[in-house]
Amino acid sequence: YKRITTQSLIEMKHNGEKISMLTAYDFTMAKMVDTAGVDVILVGDSASNVMAGHETTLPITLDQMIYHASSVVRAVGRALVVVDLPFGSYQSDPKEALRSAIRVMKESGGHAVKIEGGSEIKESIKRILNAGVPVMGHLGLTPQSIYKFGTYTVRAKEEAEAQKLMEDAQLLEKLGCFAIVLEKIPAKLAEQVAKSVNIPIIGIGAGGGVDGQVLVIHDMLGMNNEFSPRFLRRYANLWEIMTGALANYHDDVKKGDFPNEKEQY
Ligand code: KIV
Ligand code: NA
């Protein structure tokens, strides 16, 4: 099969073909996602939450993101691998942003970076794009700004914030970003944004009127039973399946049932 490129995603939008995207943070999961035919794998800084157990995405470091991303890249044959630039690796100045993007590309082998924000980070996006590194934008609920927002509720419900989001999306397109993630905003606004730009809009909690969807893999596989926002669809209940299997193993060892005659040398 052909490798997915940033260009293929733009073609998908123009052909009206929806884009599928999921996160992955390690070799084994990335292999499954790629085998399933998912178009884009995001090595999200949500690794900070689901892999490391932090409450927010802020603590994860660039080195840790590169470790996750390099593990994912080794597993993938078809999907486009996009890597989040973590909090603190691009906000200080455009040169730092470029250095961080270059480290991701060189040390992980990922195919693109994703950065949260609009006009505030314009110069950084320009610099990274000038170096030949594809950039995916991220607007709406941007979790690296959680302490500014105060809550994880829906963004851009008010006219002023909706207007700024629309302008930011158009700016990101103009700068040369190849796609934009819109997180947790009203479906109607997301659809308007998708119609007003020629680059793909990938939604999470942004309704069905956009060009593609992304979910955090641990959430959609039901690996945690605590997180259940309205936008999440659970495709499996791996929490139950896995804790059940682990408890059975524990019982079998306690009973002396494992290993049996055939399971030894
Ligand atoms: O880090 C992440 O998982 C993300 C997606 C939710 C878009 O940025
Ligand atoms: Na992220």
Image (cartoon, rainbow, N blue to C red):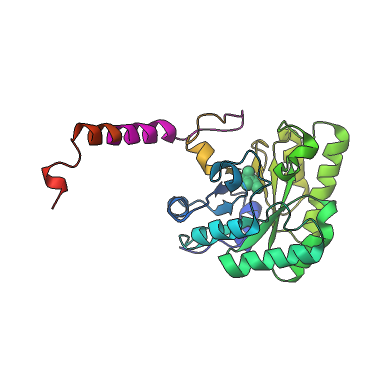
Q: Which residue lies furthest to the right in this view?
A: 160
Q: How many marks?
A: 0
Residue 104 x %, y %: 63, 64
Q: In the rendered structure, does residue 246 fall within the stretch colored magenta? A: yes
Q: Quadrant of the N terminus?
A: bottom left
Which segment is the magenta one? 228-249
Residue 16 image point, x, y percent? 62, 49
Q: Residue at x 78, y 61 (%)?
A: 125
Whether residue 80 is visible? no
Q: Could you say which is closer to the camera, residue 188 or residue 122?
A: 122
In the image, residue 151 lies at what x, y percent? 73, 32
Q: Is residue 103 left or right of residue 118?
A: left
Q: Which residue is drawn at 66% across and 42% down?
A: 203
Position of residue 237 in the picture relative to residue 88 (left or right): left
In the image, farthest residue toward the left: 261
* Image height of 153 relative to 41, above or below: above
Q: Position of residue 107 (x, y in %)?
A: 58, 68
- The question of residue 242 being in magenta is answered with yes
For residue 113, above or below residue 45: below
Which residue is located at x 52 percent, y 64 percent?
3
Pick the residue in front: 111 or 195: 111
> Image check: 39 left or right of 119?
left
- Determine the image quadrant of residue 165: top right
Looking at the image, residue 76 sits to the left or right of residue 111; the answer is: left
Residue 240 visible in this rendered orientation of the protein: yes
Q: Kindly identify the residue that appears in the image at 70 percent across and 63 percent down.
A: 100
